[in-house]
Image (spheres, rainbow, N blue to C red):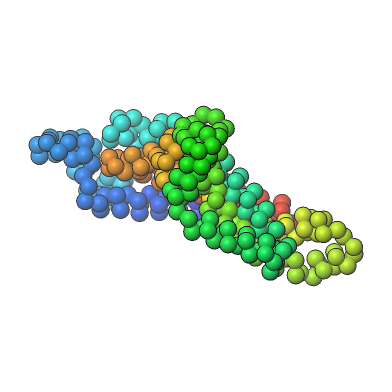
Amino acid sequence: MAFMLLRRLGQAVLILLGVAAITFILLYALPADPARMIAGRSATAQTVASIRHQLGLDQPLLIQFWIYLSGLLQGDLGRSYAQKTEVWTLIVARLPATLTLMAAGIAVEVVLGVTFGTVAAIKRGGIVDRLVMMASFVGVSAPQFVVALLLLYVFAVTLGWFPMSGYGSFAHVVLPATTLGVLGAGWYARMVRSAMIDVLNQDYVRTARAKGLSSRRIIFRHALPNAILPIVAMIGIDIGQFMGGVVVVEAVYGWPGIGQLAWQAIQQVDIPIIMGVTLTSALAIVTGNLLADLIAPFIDPRIRTS
């Protein structure tokens, strides 16, 4: 276990360095000029050049990356060009909203996906199975902004059950989490159905039936723990995606998360914030995958013994 953790930590460091390098190069390859954005359209060339010098943007790319990397190794994500504030401070301020939406969204997609996927596998070939697969296809295919606007119209405008936007209470998180969960639930339902069908045809399940075990015990004690392993891996990936923020959902619901911060930074060509959000998302993906690897042996003991 200790060796595995050390190996994964080494891989995480290399992944983060690679993400930082690729993102840095891509951002500076863009035609947009941060100095011009800060100075304004009517600024003179001398003013723009002065701002570019103050930000260090007039230095060679490798030197700029080395300076950024040196600060990153010391825990410094840089300073926002537009907001004149440390990037780490801005990200930390948005973390509570992002973590809340992430946890709620994952909970919705797991509960819906596992439930409907299991039901579809048990009722394989029937009308219930077909309805679940059709609904999952619609959920996977529907654009998030369409789902968000539809939920707002029905449950906020027409019925008045939930607020239109905002952050701070359970009622505020229901619609954004449901919007995120619909897409993931479609994928999860399909994965669970496929895995459950395969598991239910295994020899040990047939042996359990021959011993007279109830269907409920067979499903929840023997079949589901084995079928749910792919979901654990998917949750690790979703943690990183949700930590990066879903810009469309946060924009529709006015959710003050990291995704909204990143969108504002993109509009202002605020490179330090874009870099900070990207690295935070990459770190969340690596951490989520590591947690998934650590949790999997507790679900399936065969992984632990191997």
- Tell me the quadrant of the picture where the C terminus can be found: bottom right
List the single residue furthest toward the front. Answer: 158
Q: Residue furthest right?
A: 211
- Identify the residue at image location x=81%, y=56%: 216
In percent of the image, x 66 and y 56: which residue is there?
116
Q: Work out whether residue 266 or residue 15 is closer to the camera in this orientation and state it.
A: 266
Residue at the image point whose x is 48% and y is 55% from the top? 142
Q: Nearer the viewer, residue 25 or 143?
A: 143
Q: Is residue 92 left or right of residue 292?
A: left
- Left/right placement of residue 211 relative to residue 2 reads right
- State whether residue 77 appears in this view: no
Q: Quadrant of residue 223?
A: bottom right
- Figure quadrant of residue 125: bottom right
Residue 280's image quarter? top left
* Residue 98 position in % (x across, y down): 49, 38
Q: How many marks overall?
A: 0
Measured as percent of width and height from the top left, residue 39 is found at: 18, 35
Is residue 40 shown to the viewer in this render?
yes
Picture coordinates of residue 289, whole percent (x, y): 56, 52
Is 77 left, or right, of 42 in this rendering?
A: right
Residue 187: percent from left, percent from top: 56, 58
Residue under the image location 54 percent in, 61 percent down: 137
